[in-house]
Amino acid sequence: MHHFAVPTAVPSAPAQLLADAKRPVHTPAGLVGDTPVLWVGEPFTASGSGFWAKLEGHNPGGIKDRTALYMVQAARRRGDLLPGSPLVESTSGTLGLGLALAGVTYGHPVTVVTDPGMEPLMSGLLTAYGTEVQMVATPHPVGGWQQARRQRVEGLLAAHPDAWCPDQYHNPDNVAAYRPLAHELVAQLGRIDALVVSVGTGGHSAGIGTVLRGFFPGLRIVGVDTTGSTIFGQPAGTRLMRGLGSSIYPGNVAYGLFDEVHWVAAPESVWAARALARCRYATGGWSVGAVALVARWLAGRMPAESRIVAVFPDGLQRYVGTVFDDTYCRRHGLLGHEPASDPHEITHPSEATVTCWTRCTTVVDPLGATRGQQRPAEVSR
């Protein structure tokens, strides 16, 4: 059992009381960053194994606070975004909160385009922060809800020439924004042997992975996607999970970084997120559950002294009506599906359409002929 440390001496000067405290901040942007890492071990993992979780839910809105602030600041510096001009973007939620924060910080009105899958809690939070929420009514016949949202954004930009869209899927600033997060991990842990990270727009996986690989050339990087996502070469399918996966091909995905990819299904993610909540208190939604499941498996197969980091993009608050709601989960058939001890294995993403937790050590850019990136991963790593 762990206990709180009891101070044995009274500080001799008031300044010493602030030695471990965060400094006062003058703008909301100062609330972002310097998030904690938490050890996740048994009973979530097998005895003697575990991993470190980077808790990005300790940011005001989640991990995408970092990229929203960075993209807006960079656009203002270049002159692409003029003072007071509107921000317009497509989002399933988390970036919306980050843009709301950036809008308040820098003085920009914000409009986000989403779809009926956005949780009412998230829509309410965005509205509370002064963000206009527009919702598309029908999915695009090929690109699904994601493409439908992007088309609405294009229409808004055409109607408001002074508006600016961050385009999180293809904006390289979305990648650069995560350097500080990677530096925090190095400072907090000293050495990192493996990184487990979800992949959606490709921003934080590329940004964190590139920096950490520079520090640790032998770093094993494991990407986590959802079933029904096209990012790593699977056919598009119905996706219940939000925050990871895509029905388009984001330009920010750094395929050459990954040693392997895992696809996780919604019921498996729900099991892991709920198990985390019960045994470690720190948890989150779809992305956190999927990442934790893969990190748990990896921790049981790498040497006990290995330092594995899993990035948890947000907390559980926005998921109280979905992942942690029994009625919702029963309606979608998400309960009672404890994952297998090991993932299914395929040798190439085109080998089969995956419907449950599946691993592949050949990582291929589906647009390889166009983008020139295709890299078989090293199975021995």
Image (cartoon, helix red, strand yellow):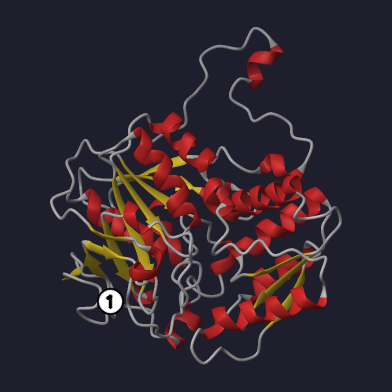
Please name the residue shown 58% across and 62% down the image. 168
Instruction: Tell me which residue sits at (63%, 27%) in the image.
Output: 21
* Residue farthest to the right, as pictured: 84
Along the line of sight, the residue nearer the viewer: 337 or 79: 79
Q: Within the image, what quadrant is residue 185 found in?
A: top left
Most extreme residue toward the top is 12
Point out residue 10 in the picture as x, y percentages from the top left corner: 60, 12
Q: Position of residue 59 (x, y in %)?
A: 61, 48
Residue nearest the viewer, comparing 331 with 358: 358
Would residue 178 be found to the left or right of residue 292 on screen? Answer: right
* Label 1 CA crowd tier, 10 Å (few <14, some 14–19, many 20+): some
Q: Is residue 174 left or right of residue 306?
A: right
Query: Residue 57 appears at what percent x and percent y?
Result: 55, 52
Q: Is residue 22 above or below residue 36?
A: above
Please state if 80 lies on the left or on the right of 352 as rendered: right
* Picture quarter with the N terminus: top left
Residue beneath the point at 65% across and 54% down: 68
Look at the image and tell me whether residue 63 can be seen. no
- Residue at label 1? 356
Visible residue check, residue 309: yes
- Indicate whether 280 appears above or below 6: below
Helix, strand or loop status at disc 1: loop
* Number of numbered markers: 1
State the image quarter where residue 262 is shown: bottom left
User: Mark 1 is on which residue type?
Assistant: Cys
The residue lying toward the viewer, choosing from 228 and 292, is 228
Q: Residue at x 75, y 73 (%)?
A: 157
